[in-house]
Image: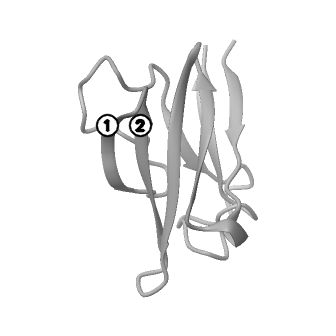
Amino acid sequence: MMAMKHIPVFKESLPYHADFRIAGTTYTFTFNYNSEGDFFTIDLERNGDVLVQGEKIVYGRALFLSVLDERFPDYPIVPIDFSMQVDRVGWRELGNDVYLVVLED
């Protein structure tokens, strides 16, 4: 059975960084917002090493898919809307309808 963990995003604090533990490893996520394009990005660090900067959060697409590197999370992190009513990740959607979910087994 697949377990899900929610990664909260505190829009009122943007930009900000926070540590999250995924599969026993701690990652630092830096959340940013582009108001002109109405989208969010994430920078990812592990043990002080920058793994990626400016990864755009796109609805239904797992983060960091384009990188094949063992330093990245083993489980997909996917922005999804459980009610299936929206299909984008803008200011109005993230944290209200759309959530970042870690899909662990």
- Quadrant of the snapshot with the N terminus: top right
Instruction: Give the left or right position of residue 91, taking residue 29 as reference.
Output: right
Residue at 62%, 33% in the rendered image: 20
Which residue type carries mark 2?
Glu
What secondary structure is marked by label 2?
strand
Q: Which residue lies furthest to the front in this view?
A: 48
Q: Which residue lies furthest to the bottom in this view?
A: 36
Instruction: Give the left or right position of residue 59, taking residue 104 as reference.
Output: left
- Of residues 32 and 80, the one nearer the viewer is 32
Residue underneath mark 1: 51
Q: How crowded is mark 2: few (under 14 residues within 10 Å), some or many (20 or more)?
A: many
Whole-percent x, y for residue 69 in the image: 26, 23
Whole-percent x, y for residue 59 in the image: 49, 57
Q: Which mark is residue 77?
A: none
Residue at 70%, 31% in the rendered image: 5
For the residues labelled 2 and 1, say whether their Cβ atoms are less than 8 Å apart: yes
Residue underneath mark 2: 45
Q: Quadrant for residue 18, please give it.
A: top right
Label 2 or label 1, whichever comes before in sequence order = 2
Whole-percent x, y for residue 92 in the image: 67, 76
Whole-percent x, y for residue 68 in the image: 23, 26
- Quadrant of the snapshot with the C terminus: top right
Which residue type carries mark 1?
Leu
Residue at 65%, 64% in the rendered image: 94
Q: In this view, does 31 lie above or below 19?
A: below
